[in-house]
């Protein structure tokens, strides 16, 4: 089945933004958010992800959860491209105050200023927070 | 639920998915396939091994659409299409192949 | 766009992040609810940042939550009070909503 067919059957495409603001392992938010994002891909919508505050820690390279015996879901962010989810926005200020930059992240992202992030958010049809 | 293979017991969930994917081996896969009425051919193994590699890399079982596209990329368009995969796994490559591969049910499987 | 804040500004950074992202832009509004309503009161360490934001955006607080916490008399000038019906109206009036959990 071609993607074009899916679009025709699916009707209106809306802009969905998933906002991630929590670090990965201390709470379940980040993992739950990622699962919702993966499920959302089945609906052929215009999906983007925003990472702010401690949410930027979800994307830090070199996570190894072996000793804490939790699932290392950081590799799953690299699967998003295969799900046609390619709009990943990271707020610059959130990176800076944590001593991070784009090279510390395990996927390609677009770094935005706080104001640009605000505009991006306002342009969505639906914003869902984790 | 549980599955017995070569005298060893493997725990599964209520739908027959292996609970501990580290316990998987080819004999377990064959037993799981038997439960699905599937005779494993080389083409089946190719998809199963692809799924296991995908899981190792991304820590998820891919949605069918994603699996189809990724197989097409790696094994060519004659294999990267729904018909080919559904011929191999009539009840859905996502669900059936993932089960035989010892993976959890695909995220985004609706 | 409507931004909803439901956490005390002294407990986490939701208000600070919201103001950073939305504070300078037009067409954004903030609604304080639950423990977030402390952010709408006078004499706090965050009062100035909320006042600065009020230059650009409308700021609302949910009156039942202010009353429950005994701070209805401490609300900053310029903050508009709403009841539950007003809350629903705000959500309906705006194109989209971000809840800063």
Image: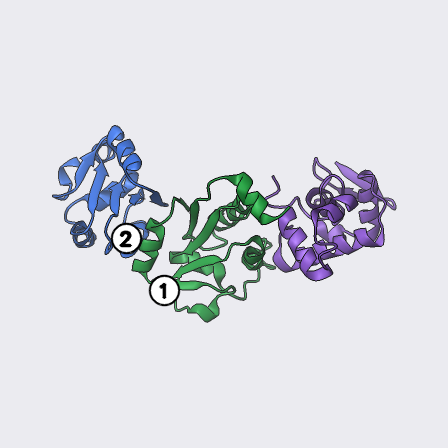
Chain colours: A green, B purple, C blue
Q: Say which of A81 and A90 sits in front.
A: A81
| Category of crowding for the residue at label 2, using alpha-carbon neighbours closer than 10 angstroms: few (below 14), some (14–19), many (at least 20) | many
Q: Which residue is mark 1?
A: A92
Please say whether residue B63 is visible from this viewpoint: no
Q: Which residue is mark 2?
A: C22
Image x and y of residue B48, in percent: 75, 52
**A56 or B85: nearer the eye?**
B85
Judged from the image, the secondary structure of the residue bearing numbered disc 1 is helix
Local crowd size for mark 1, using a 10 Å CA cut-off: few (<14), some (14–19), many (≥20): many
Considering every residue shown, the one lying at the far left of the view is C77
**Is C47 left or right of A8, judged from the image as shown?**
left
- The chain to which mark 1 is attached is A
Q: Residue drawn at (72%, 57%), measured in percent from left and top? A: B50
Residue at 21%, 40% in the rendered image: C60
In which quarter of the view is residue A110 placed?
bottom left
How far from the left and from the top, in percent, is residue A91? 37, 61
Task: Single out the residue that lies furthest toward the right.
Answer: B6
Dots 1, 2 in contact, CB < 8 A = no
Q: Which mark is residue B68?
A: none
**Where is residue A3 shown, x and y percent of the image?**
58, 48
Q: Residue at x 23, y 56 (%)?
A: C24
């Amino acid at each position: 089945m071609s993607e074009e067919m899916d679009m025709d059957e699916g009707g209106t495409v809306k802009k969905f933004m998933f906002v991630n603001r929590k670090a990965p392992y201390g709470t379940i938010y980040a993992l739950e958010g990622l699962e919702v994002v993966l499920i959302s891909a089945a609906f052929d919508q215009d999906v983007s992800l925003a990472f702010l505050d401690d949410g930027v820690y979800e994307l830090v390279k070199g996570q190894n959860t072996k000793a804490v015996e939790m699932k290392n879901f950081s590799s799953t962010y690299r699967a998003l491209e295969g799900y046609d989810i390619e709009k990943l926005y990271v707020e610059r200020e959130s990176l800076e105050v944590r001593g991070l930059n784009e090279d510390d992240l395990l996927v390609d992202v677009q770094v935005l200023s706080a104001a640009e992030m605000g505009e991006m958010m306002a342009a969505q049809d639906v914003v869902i927070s984790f | 639920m549980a599955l017995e293979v070569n005298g060893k017991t493997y725990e599964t969930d209520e739908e027959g998915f292996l609970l501990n994917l580290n316990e998987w081996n080819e004999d377990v896969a064959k037993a799981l396939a038997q439960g699905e009425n599937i005779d494993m051919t080389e083409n089946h193994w190719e998809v199963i091994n692809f799924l296991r590699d995908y899981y190792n890399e991304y820590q998820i079982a891919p949605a069918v659409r994603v699996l189809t596209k990724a197989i097409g990329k790696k094994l060519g368009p004659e294999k990267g299409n729904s018909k080919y995969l559904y011929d191999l796994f009539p009840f859905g490559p996502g669900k059936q192949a993932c089960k035989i591969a010892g993976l959890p049910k695909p995220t985004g499987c609706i | 766009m409507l931004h909803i804040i439901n956490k005390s500004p002294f407990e986490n950074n939701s208000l600070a992040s919201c103001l950073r992202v939305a504070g300078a832009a037009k067409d954004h509004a903030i609604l304080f609810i639950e423990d977030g309503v402390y952010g709408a009161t006078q004499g706090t360490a965050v009062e100035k940042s909320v006042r600065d934001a009020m230059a650009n955006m409308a700021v609302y607080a949910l009156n039942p939550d202010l009353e429950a916490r005994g701070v209805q008399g401490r609300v900053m000038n310029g903050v508009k009070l709403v009841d539950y019906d007003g809350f629903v109206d705000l959500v309906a009036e705006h194109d989209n909503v971000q809840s800063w959990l």
